[in-house]
């Protein structure tokens, strides 16, 4: 009997996984596959690996969690290392595969990878790319992606008026995973992979906002803790610009960006919370932020490689230089601006930085230091535990005045520090021993 490959790309979950549902519908035994792609670790123009240790650790934990969930349903996750187009072709021959199903993502490298697969997979194997990482489905939008509004507010107003979020799909109770005797060998493959080398061994910094652990189980636990157990959602709008601690904002981003939890699952939990506990500005605001996330995803689909141009999607003439010395001081948290330095040191030590911090350091690099914003975006790509191509490059461009908002978004970082860190607790936490 022919088989279906379900390729997990950056969607390490079983819940609300449209590609998994699609694969199940085909009615053939399913071969679940993860491919550790050497391109993840290629170096950027800054000479750093695209995926640094924080994200590599998170991905490794996420893959382990996925493998265990599949094992508990009687399946075996196949983990291979190599270029997806070659590995998938090999698997098609090895297991008599007639269908490949996987999620599709924005980003030029992602699109190139999908093209290579289409051209290299044996002709007899069908391919289905399924959407599933956004809150809204592109088919439900009241405009074509090419007509995505230039700024966020008209986009939000249109979709809030015209689009219903599709209900999340629970994982099927029983899956027809292809029976392969599990000898636990996936653990050895993962352990010996480049992903494990990249993750390395490190102790989490005790000042980290959260001990982020990869995987769907940890993502669901965080959802439960933030929304239900801690009841933090009801004050989200007031606390979300915070800088210290686990609960000033949801901290869902690493699980969202790495596909351990779906935005529709978060949306449905917010709706349940609104029905059972409280519905207010804060509960609305979390959905509002998920719409920001969608806006950047759709924008990346629309603009393709323009997302990475110096002049951004506006094609603007900018006067920012690739100045390595200024860049390095910024990256090391040694600019002399205490607020910027504290944020960069948090990023370097933990792989996370608040949204307030990200806006400030981005604006500071591109506008105060006059450095090419793409060096900062590239540094974030390496460092962030929640790196996402669309959110990262879109937000960087936005804060460097070449993105969706034509207004100048230069931040007065000293004023921001006074507003958001009036007592200096945040700066003291990250600049211990440094006078400011
Ligand atoms: C320069 C810069 C780079 C960024 N890079 C990334 C990135 O690589 N990956 C990433 O997920 N976010 C990125 N963001 C957006 C935002 O800073 C983070 O999503 C947020 O800080 C994560 O914390 P949280 O989960 O507690 O957010 P919350 O405030 O709890 O928000 C809930 C969710 O909404 C989404 N969200 C919130 N704000 C934004 C936003 N401005 N853009 C897109 N989505 C948003 C995130 O998925 C987030 O998890 C960036 C922002 C800036 C200014």
Image (cartoon, rainbow, N blue to C red):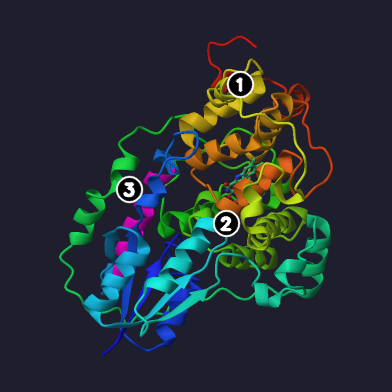
The tag earlier along the polypeptide, 1 or 2, is 2
Q: What is the spatial separation of the Cα atoms under label 3 and label 1, in whole angstroms?
A: 31 Å
Is the residue 378 above or below the residue 159 in the image?
Answer: above
The answer to which image quadrant residue 289 occupies is: bottom right
Crowd class of label 2 (few under 14; some 14 to 19; many from 20; radius 10 Å): some
What is the secondary structure assignment of the residue under circle 2?
helix
Does the residue tagged 2 have its C-beta within 8 Å of any atom of ligand 1? no
What is the secondary structure assignment of the residue under circle 1?
helix
Can you say which quadrant of the picture contains the C terminus?
Answer: top right
> Magenta includes 271?
no
Q: Is residue 254 visible?
A: yes
Residue indicated by mark 3: 195
Residue indicated by mark 2: 228
Residue indicated by mark 1: 326
Front residue of 56 and 168: 56
The tag earlier along the polypeptide, 3 or 1, is 3
Can you say which quadrant of the picture contains the N terminus?
Answer: bottom left
Point 66% across, 72% down: residue: 138
Left or right for 211, reference 168: left
Crowd class of label 3 (few under 14; some 14 to 19; many from 20; radius 10 Å): many
Is the residue 118 above or below the residue 66 in the image?
Answer: below
Left or right for 17, reference 144: left
Q: What is the spatial separation of the Cα atoms under label 1 and label 2, in whole angstroms?
A: 44 Å
Percent of width and height locating residue 200: 31, 38
Point 77% across, 75% down: residue: 142
| Range shown magenta | 55-70
């Amino acid at each position: 009997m022919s088989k279906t490959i379900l390729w997990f790309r950056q969607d390490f979950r079983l819940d609300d996984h449209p590609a998994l549902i699609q694969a199940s519908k085909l009615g053939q035994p399913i071969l679940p596959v993860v491919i550790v792609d050497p391109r993840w670790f290629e170096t950027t123009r800054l000479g750093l690996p695209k995926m640094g240790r924080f994200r590599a650790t998170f991905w490794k934990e996420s893959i382990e969690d996925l493998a265990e969930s599949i094992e508990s349903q009687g399946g075996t996750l196949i983990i291979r290392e190599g270029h997806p187009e070659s590995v998938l072709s090999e698997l098609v021959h090895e297991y008599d595969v007639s269908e490949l199903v996987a999620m599709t993502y924005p980003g030029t490298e992602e699109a190139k990878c999908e093209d290579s697969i289409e051209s290299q997979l044996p002709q007899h194997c069908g391919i289905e790319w399924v959407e599933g990482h956004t809150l809204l489905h592109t088919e439900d939008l009241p405009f074509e992606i090419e007509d995505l509004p230039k700024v966020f507010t008209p986009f939000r107003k249109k979709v809030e008026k015209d689009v219903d979020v599709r209900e999340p799909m629970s994982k099927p109770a029983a899956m027809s995973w292809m029976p392969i005797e599990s000898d636990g060998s996936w653990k050895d493959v993962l352990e010996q992979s480049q992903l494990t080398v990249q993750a390395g061994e490190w102790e989490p910094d005790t000042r980290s906002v959260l001990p982020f652990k990869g995987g769907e189980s940890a993502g669901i636990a965080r959802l439960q803790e933030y929304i239900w157990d801690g009841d933090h959602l009801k004050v989200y709008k007031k606390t979300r610009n915070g800088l210290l601690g686990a609960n000033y904002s949801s901290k869902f981003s690493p699980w969202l960006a790495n596909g351990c939890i779906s935005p529709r699952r978060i949306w449905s939990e917010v709706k349940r919370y609104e029905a059972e506990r409280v519905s207010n500005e804060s509960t609305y605001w979390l959905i509002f932020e998920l719409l920001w996330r969608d806006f950047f995803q759709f924008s990346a689909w629309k603009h393709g490689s323009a997302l990475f141009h110096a002049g951004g999607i506006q094609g603007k003439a900018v006067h920012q230089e690739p100045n390595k010395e200024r860049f390095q001081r910024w990256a090391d948290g040694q600019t002399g601006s205490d607020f910027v330095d504290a944020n960069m040191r948090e990023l370097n030590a933990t792989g996370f930085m608040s949204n307030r911090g990200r806006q400030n350091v981005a604006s500071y690099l591109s506008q105060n230091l006059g450095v090419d914003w793409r060096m900062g975006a590239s540094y974030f790509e390496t460092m962030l535990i929640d790196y996402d191509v669309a959110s990262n490059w879109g937000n960087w461009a936005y804060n460097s005045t070449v993105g969706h908002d034509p207004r100048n978004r230069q931040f007065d970082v000293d004023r921001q520090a006074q507003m958001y860190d009036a007592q200096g607790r945040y700066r003291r936490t990250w600049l211990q021993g440094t006078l400011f």
